[in-house]
Amino acid sequence: MYSFKDKLSHYLPNSNSNSSQANPTSKDDKSLSSYLSYIIPSIGIGGSKTNKHEHDLQPIQSDCFEYNYEKLENQDDDKLDQYVDCSPPCSMDLLKDEIISEDLTSRKSSSSSEVFEEANEQQIPNTSKKSVLNLSHDSTFISPELYEFFESCLPNIVKGRQWVLLYSTSKDGVSLRTLIRKSAELSCPCLLIAGDMKGAVFGGLLECPLKPTPKRKYQGTNQTFVFTTIYGQPTLFRPTGANRYYYMCLRDFIAIGGGGNYALCLDEDLLTGTSGPCDTFGNKCLAHSPEFELKNVELWGFRHASPSRG
């Protein structure tokens, strides 16, 4: 039987063989160290399982970081500053400021233009009213609307001509004789315009010069008409063809229309008048009442504008 020592020596390596003792130990040590070096790096920071894998992956990491740093190092301070200044938040702020500034500027310019236009409109009645209406003098009755109405109603022979104030009670006094005398300054159709104290404007188209007759005798042509503003807007009444009672002129009164009533009759002093329906024009009363006081009387003629002198 073998002793305990023999059994033990059977399992233990031979003490006389140094190489046989060293090899198992170094092999075991190498295997253990290799195993540990494989396990430990796999849980390290680098993320490599072996030195070989660590060697293969390391250049990739270094190249990535070196590439980013090189790009940052190659940028100048000026470019970085410029990049910071032109960043999207700054650009949006600048864009908003520019939009607000432009909006305020446009509002100021529009408000200034509106004020300028209002100022011009306020100056038109005082400076250019005559040229716009083509009147030789200011009128008590003629507004731009009434002027346009007359321009559409007047005979073609006088359209576009300058309006010439031949007579006005406010300028020449209250006298029918003076009105007749002043009408001789032009030979053309003329427009008689009058108004009552309540604001109605009325009148009619006659022929200049006016020729007073000793007896009641009608004159005129079928171009004669009467008008009034009493119905809310200018209203024109032309001959109906019922008769030829266009107008008559005497030294003590002037009347337009006939057949039933005069459409319009002005007394010698040009202070009072009458109006009523008549067959000649088929009109209604031209004033607020059949009998009325006159506010003013104007007689307008028409002539070609004189050529401008250089």
Image: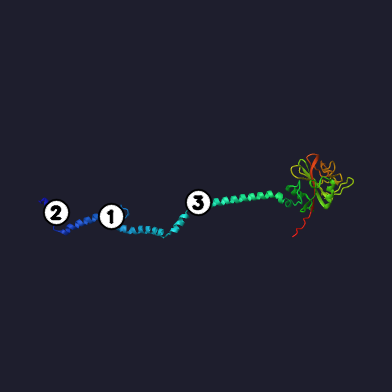
Label 3 Cα crowd, 10 Å radius (few <14 / some 14-19 / many 20+): few
Q: Secondary structure at mark 1?
A: helix
Q: Secondary structure at mark 3?
A: helix
Whether residue 263 is visible: no
Q: Nearer the viewer, residue 254 or 169?
A: 169
User: Label 3 amino acid?
Assistant: Asp
Is 175 displayed left or right of 96 in the figure? right
Q: Nearer the viewer, residue 50 or 24?
A: 50
Q: Position of residue 169 (x, y in %)?
A: 80, 46
Q: Which residue is mark 1?
A: 38
Is 192 displayed left or right of 96 in the figure? right
Looking at the image, residue 122 lies above or below residue 61: above
User: Label 1 amino acid?
Assistant: Tyr
User: Label 2 amino acid?
Assistant: His
Q: How many marks?
A: 3
The numbered mark, 1 or 3, whose residue comes first in the sequence reads 1
> Which residue occupies the extreme right position in the image?
214
Image quarter hosting the C terminus: bottom right
Looking at the image, residue 80 lies above or below residue 172: below
Label 1 Cα crowd, 10 Å radius (few <14 / some 14-19 / many 20+): some
